[in-house]
Image (cartoon, helix red, strand yellow):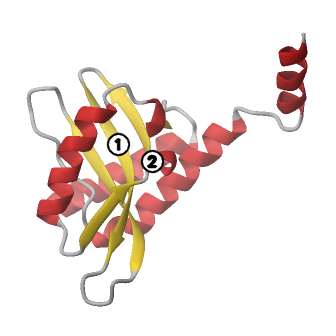
Amino acid sequence: MIGEQMDGFISSLIQKTEYNSLDWKPLTLFTKYDSFEREARELIILSENDFFKSILPSSSYFLEHKEGYLVLCNIFMMQNETEMHYDKLILFTKINPYIPLNDSGNFSAIQPKLEHLKLLIEHNIASNYKLPDDLYNFWRNILD
């Protein structure tokens, strides 16, 4: 039941992100990062079979809604048996400050959709810049 709800929700996120109608931002800009990281770290350690290494904030994204937020979080893991390292995406949901963080995207079947969502977010963020013109203007502004 929750898997079907999550699948539909992520499909809708993908569609809205495709039309650039959601305000995704890099996790490195998240003002609530410290409290998010503490909660996420605890949740990952409790729910994952493999060894959690770290959150990769430079390739993770968030969006805020009312009192809550979503975080599409890229995490670095190590497989216990083989010690092989890999990245994994988890969609975290925080409804409000009073309810604990939820790892609502922790189903392996939705990994491809989360990867698609991440690519769309990165495309949308990159499309805000017109290179090389923005680069040249930035350099010029520094020298002015």
Location of the N terminus (image quadrant): bottom left
Residue nearest the observer in this picture, 68 or 34: 34
Identity of the amino acid at label 2?
Ser
Judge left or right: residue 77 versus residue 46: right
Question: Does the rendering let one see residue 13?
Answer: yes
Residue nearest the observer in this picture, 80 or 96: 80
Question: Which residue does the image show at 30% across and 80% down from the upper left?
Answer: 79
Question: Which residue does the image show at 31% across and 51% down from the upper left?
Answer: 91
Location of the C terminus (image quadrant): top right
Proximity of marks 1 and 2: CB atoms separated by less than 8 Å: yes
Question: Which residue does the image show at 48% across and 40% down from the upper left?
Answer: 16
132 to 123, vertically: above or below: above
Identity of the amino acid at label 1?
Val
Q: Secondary structure at mark 2?
A: loop
Q: Residues within 10 Å of mark 1 (few under 14, many from 20)?
A: many
Question: Which residue does the image show at 62% across and 38% down from the upper left?
Answer: 125
Find residue 62 and report its horizontal and vertical position in percent: 40, 37
5 to 111, vertically: above or below: above
Residue 128: which numbered mark, if any?
A: none
User: Residue placed farthest to the bottom in the image?
Assistant: 82
Question: Does the rendering let one see residue 103?
Answer: no
Judge left or right: residue 132 versus residue 111: right
Q: In which quadrant of the rendered view does residue 49 lie?
A: bottom left
Judging by the rendered image, the residue that carries numbered circle 1 is 71
45 to 64, vertically: above or below: below
Q: In which quadrant of the rendered view does residue 8 lie?
A: bottom left
User: Residue placed farthest to the front in the image?
Assistant: 143
Task: Return the disc, 1 or 2, that comes first in the chain's sequence.
Answer: 2
Judging by the rendered image, the residue that carries numbered circle 2 is 60
26 to 112, vertically: above or below: above
Find residue 27 and report its horizontal and vertical position in percent: 44, 38
